[in-house]
Image (tube, coloured by chain):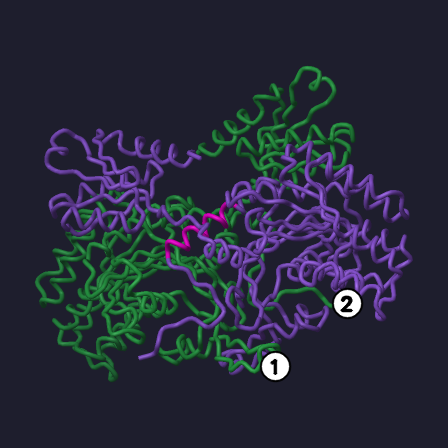
Chain colours: A purple, B green
Amino acid sequence: MIKPRTPPGVMELLPRDQIAFDRMLDTIRRTFEGFGFLPVETPVFELSEVLLTKSGGETERQVYFVQSTGALEKAGESLPELALRFDLTVPLARYVAEHERELAFPFRRYQMQRVYRGERAQRGRFREFYQCDIDVIGKDALSPRYDAEIPAVIHAVFTALGIGAFTIQMNHRKLLRGFFEGLGIEGSRQDAVLRELDKLDKRGADAVRETLIGEGFGLAADVADRLMAFSQVRSEGHADALARLDALGAGTPLFEQGRDELRAALERLRAMGVPESGYAINLSIARGLDYYTGMVYETTLDAHPQIGSICSGGRYDDLAGHYTKSKLPGVGISIGLTRLFWQLREAGLVDTADSSVDVLVALLDDAGLDHALALSQRLRAAGLNVETQLEPRKLAKQLQYADRAGIRFVAIRGEDEAARGAVAVKDLRRGEQFEVAEDDLGRTLLVEREQLRSMP
Amino acid sequence: MIKPRTPPGVMELLPRDQIAFDRMLDTIRRTFEGFGFLPVETPVFELSEVLLTKSGGETERQVYFVQSTGALEKAGESLPELALRFDLTVPLARYVAEHERELAFPFRRYQMQRVYRGERAQRGRFREFYQCDIDVIGKDALSPRYDAEIPAVIHAVFTALGIGAFTIQMNHRKLLRGFFEGLGIEGSRQDAVLRELDKLDKRGADAVRETLIGEGFGLAADVADRLMAFSQVRSEGHADALARLDALGAGTPLFEQGRDELRAALERLRAMGVPESGYAINLSIARGLDYYTGMVYETTLDAHPQIGSICSGGRYDDLAGHYTKSKLPGVGISIGLTRLFWQLREAGLVDTADSSVDVLVALLDDAGLDHALALSQRLRAAGLNVETQLEPRKLAKQLQYADRAGIRFVAIRGEDEAARGAVAVKDLRRGEQFEVAEDDLGRTLLVEREQLRSMP
């Protein structure tokens, strides 16, 4: 006998949680499709040679490699080395470069699949987790207007998920780099300073300031102060965001370009009807060092800042330089859904009340079986999810089962109801019972279900 | 520069095909949920020790193993050996045994995920492919009524997929084994004879008969003839199926039990309103040798018998004997969707006409941008999938793009229309143009979309 268990570092769900998780996946997908993104799925493994062109470094050390199998070896096939994808960006780059001539650009794709990283075992850290990504890829060029559309997608996703108030925080790498330029901080020193400013939350303002004016950096005190002041800029509301951008004063051409694009993005968001409470500028956001080149986004839950960013991304200059000579600039975001779900569940914010099953058609005795089967089929044809009780049990047991399983309705046809052509319905959610003509049952339950769903 | 390419043996789709594939996945899932099955997802890898309890043999030689990563090794973690799942049945067994006390039985689960097998490279054979499975698992016992419900699910799935007429072919292992018993064929000889009868299609009746009466088997000629006659029984229609079961004559108790269960299944299907053209008995079906113990199913497309079975399964006695002492009998089916999709596409049966995007909101000049963005948002709120043209281009180019992408509607707001508070709509599917008040646009397009969808 082998002990049944999953490998460490994976999140496996019981059905009630899985239903809640799938609802989140469905909501995200529906929203991505609402904005005209097209689905892409890639294989779980890629050729190692293709996957690991970049970096080396930390990422590569977290990669899972896949070994050839006995059957293929025996067949004498020469077996390429495979590795599990560790994100959806490298597979996207490979996909777009491989299918370049068959795709229309700007190419809008969404992808929602699991990725694999050999992270150290830790509570809330997963080695297998879902990423839900969108990207818009241009050929040769991509208008900054696409960057402005992205926060509207983020807003729609988290509004639809209904997990509480959130703020999309935006910054612009050109604004950042232009500001550094203006202070005489150039090239790789910019990266070092950025890295230091990134520690503001962790180390606190005083410690970071000390480091910046210390030996390693050697910045003048007033330069350090201006850096600190800059990276502490946060806006509240639309007008305030514009005012704070204005208040930064004049800057280098790069700085002005970044500011113009940020301003334009704010205006587009307003045009799209995104409420101003939903977005802000936050000039401390940098999102990694070399990858992003324009707008960058982070999203935080207002009531749960400790969760950190739940949706991040930005604009990059060239997606697939390792695979094609074409220049493919893009902009995209990613939601790490497995971790988000885990955190929401820890915080008690996952609603697992309702099963995916709407109705249990009860069975009181064997004689009623064929009628129960036929009734179930009619309810399915009406659009309901139906489980049929196939073996008679005490009604109390059937009700108890439905209640525990989160099935809202139980349809019961006793002798009296049968004589009247009716069905008794227990609404376990509302704690009510009512009778309805059998012919109207499907429609009635559908209406009830929709009413409850549309309640706040 | 690295050549961008996928590993051999995987099916990666361009967006139009992916949309069609996802529609099939959605349809299957909706149908499974309609019958009250609950979602389960398991990790792509399992502990090798847990996954490979069974068989050894061919399956194990096709398994992909996953190697520990550098980062984890460095961290000094002791790394268990992992392997990619090769089906969804072993993970289900592990899942049910692991969560036995948290699940309600009979446990109805569906699972739609990719599985991995190191098959030899061959056209139409994949090393990564989707399986769409349902199973009902009982604790200690499971009524044969669950076996009778399964063909109704199969019928609903393939009706909803709309890929042509199909027949669910049924047999019963007890009928088979009972018939063998009656002929004095016992134990492992039953398996050998079954294996031989399984070759009927390939080798032909004469060759199989020769083998059965030849030295290896040494069956009497009349026994061989009765075997051949038995395994050639096929029914056409409900009454014929019952009549052919009757015509088999009396048999052993096992035989009679199998016949009773088959009869009952036929009656339940009729009660559920499954049309009699959709199912038949076919006494040649055996589905593997030791695993199945009751009803067995295969499903074939009437117009494409060469595709073989597109949905198969059956009843088994004990799901998880390797993991738990509890007896867990079950019944289930599996659809190999990747292969089915590939075959349908080869046969020209995949409809890729419609994009998931319903509307392109055109942009004629920069001044119209904010209005186009706002209009797009209103259409999304109405439930439509909308792409916004973010940079002005010649209208002809925008129409051409929509046409090639399979986007049915293009919403155009020129000066004239704007003055009237209206929008012009090109319906590329019908080749028509019409004008509609902007406030009515969402509703109008929704209605048009539903009308077309409900057309035969």
Residue drawn at (14%, 29%), measured in percent from left and top? A420
Instruction: Name the quadrant of the C terminus of chain B.
Output: top left
**Residue B380 position within the rendered picture, expressed as x and y whole percent measured from the top left:** 57, 34
- Tell if the residue under mark 1 belongs to the same chain as the one under mark 2: yes
Q: Nearer the viewer, residue B87 or B245?
A: B87
Q: Is residue A170 above or below residue A433?
A: below
**Residue A380 position within the rendered picture, expressed as x and y whole percent measured from the top left:** 32, 40
Q: Which residue was labeled with disc 2?
A: B1
Query: Along the horizontal axis of the image, is A32 left or right of B2?
Result: left
Tag 1: Cα neighbours inside 10 Å, few (<14), some, or many (≥20)? few
Amino acid under disc 2: Met
Circle 1 SS class: helix
**Residue B347 position within the rendered picture, expressed as x and y whole percent measured from the top left:** 50, 52
Q: Is residue B51 above or below residue B126?
A: below
Which span of residues is magenta-colored? A15-27
Q: Which residue was labeled with disc 1?
A: B74
Of discs 1 and 2, which sits in the foreground?
Answer: 1
Q: Indicate which disc residue B386 carries.
A: none
